[in-house]
Amino acid sequence: MNPMTAPWRVVIVALGSGGDVYPMMALGAPLVARGHQVHFVSSPHFAVRARAAGFTFHACATEEDERRALQSTDLWKPVTGFRLLLQGILDNLPTVYRLICDLHEPGRTIILSNSAALAARVARETLGIPLVTIHLQPIQLRSLYVQPGVVVSERWTPVVSAFRTFFLPAVDRWLFDPIAAPTLNTFRAKFGLPPVRRIYHKWIHSPDLVLGLFPDWFAAPQRDWPPHTHLVGFPQAEPFTGAQIEPELESFLNAGPPPIVFTAGTSMTAATQFFAAAVEACRTNNRRALLLTQYPEQLPPLPDQVRHVKFAPFDRLLPRAAALVHHGGIGTMAAAFAAGIPQLVVPFNFDQPDNAARLRALGAGTFIRSQACNGAQVARALDGLLTSPAVAAKCEAIAERMRHRRFAADAADLIEAMARRSMVDVARAQAS
């Protein structure tokens, strides 16, 4: 069997919530269709969907551990949230590494991992397994020329560059490295690897291939990104949830004008103010609304024109909605782009403020700071979006672009090409 053309064993490591995991399933599906053997490493919460997609599933955490982490309100505080997130990543390091070692078949294995899977990056060094680093959001690809959360014209680029030349080393020294480096470097030392610093600057990116799961019209490539970075567009991740529109929701959708959909994300447990503002805004504007949350204890009493469901598939729901108000998660934003509807973002933490700024720069929506989120603000912002011909035209133009995306084919082509190059390099090394 020729290792350059034979089916490969693809190990996909997908850590995080649904917004992090379902896009990784969208990457694995075309590889299964091309005959490769895909092993999916993630939370047991995703086991059923992973197996339905044709993957062999391996759990790397318990649902209790994840539930405890996600239900902490500190997760949504700017600095504390980063600390909790990084600590969860580090806690998974030995387990994920052991799973990769168990699955490794020399000469025919490759890894796809999101940036949370530090174990995959270590495995590339210790075992020589070709690695594709997957970045779901532009903020994960640092640049001296772009400041997350702000979109500026080219004339201000020198100012941004001067600021970030100082800022990036400082945030690594005082925030990221003190949390991540001790645990990571202790783990690396077990294999004789030298310590690393500024982990989230360059080390986090695989030297083999980096894929950005967003298009260049959302985030233009920067000249200081890793040279082997390719943007393959937003994935079509919704089909992997396996959800349908429930009969009760179907009846509500058919009973009146398209509603405004509100969601703070599947894992958000601290959105009481967000949903209170949603209900007040819909009373003010006399609009129908649908509130999505798996934690209904966050909701105020609901008027007749407002309904609650725990979950609904965005690919089926949003084309029937008037607008989407959400937290700024990249997958949620992509689903609204595909539906061609205006978006109002209330960002809480992590990549969300940056995604919100990019949305507003595109002209397909706007945002409100979470600290300023109230019913009056939400009502005014929604009225402005829903009555703007320019916003409607921009949303339709973006939806048309989304209809012509080639995500699955482009991503699979790049992954296979990287695998072939790596197999050639291994064969040459063995022959010399």
Image (tube, grey):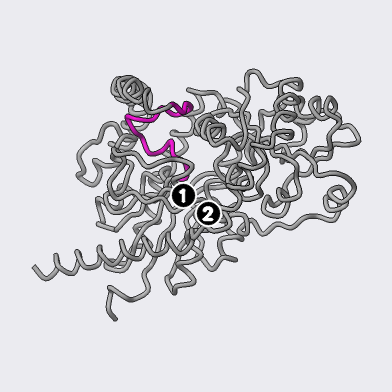
Q: Amino acid at mark 1?
A: Leu
| Residue at x-position 66% and y-position 49% | 339
* Callout 1: SS: loop
Question: Which image quadrant: the C terminus?
Answer: bottom left
Q: Is residue 18 visible?
A: no
Which span is picked out in magenta? 136-152
Q: Picture coordinates of residue 65 (x, y %)?
A: 55, 41
Inter-mark Cα distance, 1 to 2: 7 Å
Q: Is residue 134 left or right of residue 80?
A: left
Question: Which image quadrant: the N terminus?
Answer: bottom left
Q: Is residue 190 above or below residue 378?
A: below
Give the image quarter of residue 202: top left
Q: Is residue 191 left or right of residue 261?
A: left
Q: Is residue 427 above or below residue 339?
A: below
Give the image quarter of residue 368: top right
Q: Picture coordinates of residue 144 (x, y %)?
A: 32, 29
Q: Is residue 3 left or right of residue 349?
A: left
* Callout 2: SS: loop
Q: Is residue 50 left or right of residue 1?
A: right
Q: Earlier in the sequence, mark 1 or mark 2?
A: 1
Q: Picture coordinates of residue 303 (x, y %)?
A: 89, 32
| Residue at x-position 32% and y-position 37% | 184
Give the image quarter of residue 258: top right
Q: Depth check: give the residue in front, 157 or 249.
A: 157
Label 1, residues with CA under 10 Å away: few <14, some 14-19, many ≥20: many
* Extreme residue toward the left, this view: 432
Q: Which mark is residue 235?
A: 2
Q: Picture coordinates of residue 142 (x, y %)?
A: 36, 35
Q: Amino acid at mark 2?
A: Pro
Q: Is residue 245 above or below residue 346?
A: below
Q: Which mark is residue 265?
A: none
Q: Which residue is mark 1?
A: 213
